[in-house]
Amino acid sequence: MDQTTAVIDLDLPGPRISRHVYGHFAEHLGRCIYGGFYVGEDSDVPNVRGIRTDVVEALRALHIPNLRWPGGCFADDYHWRDGIGPRDRRPRMVNSHWGDVVEDNAFGTHEFMDLCELLGTDAYISGNVGSGTVAEMSEWIEYLTRADDSPMAALRRENGRDEPWKVPFFGIGNEAWGCGGNLRVEQFASLARQYSTYVRDHAGNEVYRIAAGASDDDLHWTEVLMQSFGPLDAPADAAAPATPFQGVSLHYYTMTGTWQDKGTATEFTEDEWYLALQKAGFMEHLLTRHGQVMDRYDPHRRVGLVVDEWGTWWNVEPGTNPGFLYQQNTLRDALVASVHLDAFHRHADRVVMANIAQTVNVLQAMLLTDPESGALVRTPSYHVFEMSTGHHDADSLAVHLDGVPTRATDGAELPLVSASASVKDGAALVSLSNLDAAAERTVVLDLRGREVTGHRGRVLTAPELATHNTPEAPDAVAPVELAAIRPHTRGLEVTLPAHSYATVRLDLA
C-alpha cells in the first residue's frame, strides 16, 4: 500500500492562522442577496426582519469571521445613500454587471449590518472608488460608526439605529484594474492613499483599510502599491500599523477552461479533475510571489495580504440566467477549497484575510437555496469549512511531507497529498487531502514534541468525483467518522479514501 509520511513538531508553533482567512463574500449578484440571504419580511420562508433563518443558522455553525459586501464589481456602482431610509422611497438602480437587472435597494446598510449581528460576524464593507467620491466614502464610515450628534450619526438615528456599529474592515475599491475603473496601478495607488485618508476611525472604531490589489500574478500592481507606503523597514515602527491603508488584496479564481468557456461544474473528466486541483495549487505560487514583493518593502509584515476573492468559477448551470453565476458544487470544489486553505495556513505570517466567492447561490457557494421549494442545501465546500473551524486563530504547525505521489498535469507535477496543521487550547488539528481520483492513500503522522492522549477523525468523500448535494439528496456529500486511524510507532497511521478530505483532532498532554 502506498504510504506518505507527515512530520509534525507539535511543540513548535508558528504564525497564528487568523480566523479571518475563513471569511465570506456576499454581492448583489444573482440570488446571493435576494432569495439567498434576504427574502423580505412577508415571505413564507422563515425569517427575521426579512433575513432567512435557516441561512443564518447554517452559517453560524461555521463561525464565519467576516462578511464582505456589497461587492465585487457591484460595489463600484453602489451609492450607499440609495440603500437607507424607508424601503418604499429608496431609488432604484441598474445592476449593469450582473444580469442587467433593476436593483430596488431593499437590502442596504441597515439590513447588512443586521445580518452581521445575527451571524455574529464582522462587517467588511467594500467602498466605491470607481464611480463614488471621497466625501461619499467618508460619510459612509461616519454614518456607520460615529456615536455623537454628527450629521451622519444623526441621519442614522433618523433611520432607526441609535448606537453606532463596529466596522473593522473597509475596502478601498474593488478590481480597480477592471470593473472598478479600468485604472493603471499608478493612478489607483494615488486614489487609494487619498480615499483611505478619509475613511476615519470614529468613536473608538479602528478600521483596517484594504486597497484593491492585483489579479492573479500581476506582481507590478502589488509592487506599486507597496511603493506608495513610504518606508516600512524601520524596526522601531514594526508594531505600528501601516498608513494610510493596512492591507492589499489579491483575486484568483480556479477554472479549467478559458474565460469564455470555463468548464462545467458537474460534468468533467478525470483529467479535468486533476487540472482543477493543479489550478487551485497555483494559489501557493501566488502567495509566495506576491509575498516576496511585499517582503522587499515591508520586512516586518505590517501590511497584510487579503485574498478577498477566490474559489471555483464554472459555466452557469444550464437554464439559469448567465449573469447570475449560479453553479453546482461538487466534491471537486471541496478539495479545491481544502488546497487553498492549506496554502493560507502555510502563509499565515502574511495572509491576514481571505473571502471565498460567494456565500449563497453564486460561484463556490457554501449554501444553495431552491427557489421553488425554498429548501436549503449545504454544499461540499460548506463541509470543508465546518470541518476546519478548529484552525480559527490557532497557531500553525509546519507539516513536512515525504513520499508524496505526483501526477503530471498541465505541464507540471501535481502533488496528490495536501496537508496543514495547527494547535490551540490543548489540541491540534491536522487537515489531510487525498487528491488522487482513484487510489486510497496511507499517511503516517510522525508526531513529535508532545504526548498525544486521544484522537478522532472525520472524512468527506463520495462515490463519484462529481457527486453533489441537492434538495432531494442533501447529504450525498457529508462528513462521517474516519475510522481508519491506527497507532503507529511514530504516532498514527491514517488511511484516506480516494478523493477525500479529512481532519484528525489530536488531544495533547
Image: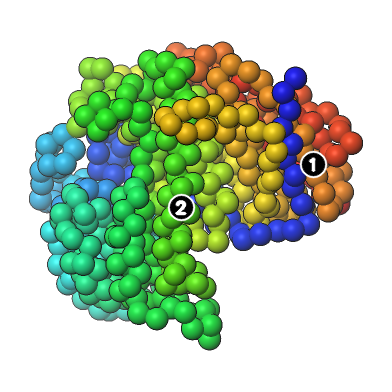
Provide residue 504's location: percent of width, then percent of height.
Answer: 71, 37
Provide residue 21's location: percent of width, then percent of height.
Answer: 49, 51
Identify which residue is drawn at 31% across, 27% down. Answer: 257
Q: Earlier in the sequence, mark 2 or mark 1?
A: 2
Residue 136 seen in render: no
In this rendering, the answer to whether 51 lies above or below 277 is below
For this view, does 182 lie left or right of residue 507?
A: left
Provide residue 214's location: percent of width, then percent of height.
Answer: 31, 55
For this view, does 76 lie left or right of residue 427?
A: left
Amino acid, disc 2 = Leu
Residues at discs 2 and 1 in contact (Cβ within 8 Å):
no
Residue receiving disc 2: 287
SS state under label 2: helix
In this rendering, the answer to whether 158 lies above or below 454 is below
Q: Residue furthest front?
A: 411
The image quarter containing residue 498 is top right
Q: 10 Å neighbourhood of mark 2: few (<14), some, or many (≥20)?
A: many
In this rendering, the answer to whether 219 lies above or below 296 is above
In the rendered structure, find residue 281 and report the number of the disc placed on it: none
31 or 414, nearer to the observer = 414
Identify which residue is drawn at 52% across, 50% down. Answer: 344
For this view, does 74 lie left or right of residue 494?
A: left
Amino acid, disc 1 = Asp
Identify which residue is drawn at 26% across, 17% down. Answer: 318
Q: 10 Å neighbourhood of mark 1: few (<14), some, or many (≥20)?
A: many
**Tally of numbered tags:** 2
Residue receiving disc 1: 446
For this view, does 425 lie left or right of residue 120?
A: right
Identify which residue is drawn at 23% across, 22% down. Answer: 320
In 3D space, how far apart are the residues under numbered discs 2 and 1 (Cα atoms)?
27 Å
The quarter of the picture where the N terminus appears is top right
